[in-house]
Image: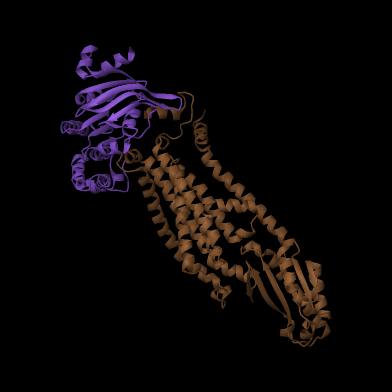
Chain colours: A purple, B brown
Amino acid sequence: MITIEVKNLVKNYGKIEAVKGISFNVNEGEIFGLIGPNGAGKTTVLRIISTLLKINSGSIKIMDYDIEKDADKIRKIISYLPEDAGAYKNLTGRSYLQFIANFFDPKKNQQMVEKGIEIADLDERIDDRVDTYSKGMMRRLLVGRALMINPKLAILDEPTSGLDVINAQEIRKLVKNTAQAGTTILLSSHNMLEVEYLCERIALISEGKIVEGGKPKDLMNKYNANNIEEVFTKVVKQ
Amino acid sequence: MSGLGNIIKKEFKELFTPATFVPIILVALIFGTMGNSIQGIQEQAKEKPIIGLINEDDDTLATITSSILYNNSKVIFNSTSIDDKQIAIDELKQKDGVALIVIPKNFTKQMRNESPGEIEIYWIMKGAGVMDTISSGVLQYLINYINTNLSKELIQDNSSVNSSFVLNPTKNIETTYFKDREFKGLTPDIIVGMLSSQSMLIPIVIMMIIIMAGGIVITSMALEKENKTLETLLTLPVKRTSIVTGKIIAAAGIGLILAIIYMIGMSFYFQGLQFSEGGISLAEYGLVLDSQDFLFIGISLFVTLIAGLSLCMLLGTFAKNYKSAQTLTFPVTMLALIPMFLTIFADFDTLPLALKGIVFAIPFSHPMMASRALIFENYMFVISGIIYVSIFASIMIIIVVWVFKTDRLLTGSTKKRKINLRQPLLLNLIRRR
């Protein structure tokens, strides 16, 4: 079953064409990666799918809901983790998770908070104010927030941004486990190793267009490359 | 370029923004306007007061009194019979008169017998603002001048005259006409004082609520952006209207708590100022608010708070960070200060038409003017104000919810720009994508 269906998506900021008619599908339970340089249009695509930005033309369906008509319904089944997201600084980590969980099923929100605490893995620091957290602790809290609600679709923009190697590895495992549990994951990353490790399929974006797509191994074979980084360089230089 | 020069150039570039200069330019404009107003007050104070005079006494002291009045004021009605009193009052009301002075038949005789000569003064009061009492103040000064001249005359005639009498040879019997009511024994000064003590607290408290709660809303929006929490909030299963309303209600609640604390302090302050009206019962003159009036004030205050906070919310959507939020509170502060000062210093009824339009258009004016209007049973004015502010609030909320549904909240202005990679703003925009 297709979770995300993007067709001829166009997004302009005034005269600037940020996304120039891209199309792709993401299947249920799949981890799909969007890769591209700064300014390629990755975050714009993620923001549109997260219902934050309007589209200029084209269409997007998420679990058969139309992004323009059914934004409210889509928000119930997705979870978005922006690249530079923050949390309310005067709340504790636990209160922040509770605040987010309160928007969802009241019967399950305590369970959600417990899951969020487990993912964040901040031990006793979970009861400290967020403004005392390091960048890595903040990111773990936010990943916990994004995944604790068991979304049908998790949209993760640079999920391991700001994390050290060990924490990043833990988050990657967590993302993989979450997908195995049935959540579809759409992520963007600059870290090609991360993409190679996590994603079942990827799309390479450059200047608002998808220039290549497929399974990482197939792409490496196609371009006779040792890793995705090489694939990316070859594709962009073409 | 030297290190110092480089730093200065960079600082200038950062500080030379509209956000730095617009508030100062506005303050300068306001001071300029205030200077002109003060000049206008001074000119008004120099003008001769317009009066009517009925002099029934043709003896010397009455003649001195009337000649002083003729020389120092503009007498537009003159008679020798008290029967013309009503005609005189009607004419003065039509021609912007300040008062009718009546010198009764036995005026001189009373003073010759060392008993105070009675001067009847019928004040025509047009507004209850401090500035509305300038003309009556000039006339009060003239009455004191008459007293001094009469004292001199009495001492010249009889050097052994009773000293306590001669220092104050006249007695004023005063009645004030204001908004179709007659206030016996009260001067415009006393009425303004009484009304101010009742209606000054409300404008100050409202001004404080608007500024405090408005600041909270604008800062809250700015912090959502600065702390990067807005994007997450907007992807949660919560309606945009709930986000907008939730922020407004919370800020209104905090604003009200702050206002209560402020009001407690201010009420003690005003109690301390009320000594000048000591012994005068406001209820006796019908200058009190009943429970129905307080209900109207409450409704007016509530809709105004919602309108003000919706406006702040709209301004808050333009705030990029905490610093820009501080700048954005400035227009709201000014919109709250203008009606507050106008309510204290002037009366809506006596304002020029253009200023009336401006004051009515500012939603914060309405609860500030409500108490005075309700004291004089001008319910239509208060109700029309409530309706206007409710419409204003509804439009503001619709606009804010619309902004929340567009890209503007996250991407800012979508003005057309030329692609120029040297522009940092554009680079920023590209990086975000």
Q: Does the image show residue B316? A: no
Give residue B251's position: percent from left, percent from top: 40, 52
* Image quadrant in which the C terminus of chain B is located: top left
Q: Is residue B35 left or right of residue A190?
A: right
Q: Is residue B18 left or right of residue B106?
A: left
Q: Residue at x 38, y 52 (%)?
A: B249
The one of B57 and B152 positioned closer to us in this rendering: B57
Q: Is residue B155 left or right of residue B233?
A: right
Q: Residue at x 46, y 59 (%)?
A: B299
The one of B375 and A86 positioned closer to us in this rendering: B375
Q: Is residue A135 left or right of residue B128?
A: left
Q: Residue at x 47, y 51 (%)?
A: B307
Give residue A150's position: percent from left, percent from top: 20, 38
Task: Check the image and report above or below for A67 versus B65.
Answer: above
- The picture quadrant where one finds residue A219 is top left
Q: How many marks?
A: 0
Task: Check the image and report above or below for A6 versus B11.
Answer: above
The one of B311 and B423 positioned closer to us in this rendering: B311
Give residue B310's position: percent from left, percent from top: 44, 48
Q: Does the image show residue B150? A: yes
Q: Residue at x 46, y 56 (%)?
A: B209
Task: Check the image and report above or below for A58 versus A238.
Answer: below
Task: Check the image and report above or below for A18 versus B135.
Answer: above
Give residue A59's position: percent from left, percent from top: 33, 27
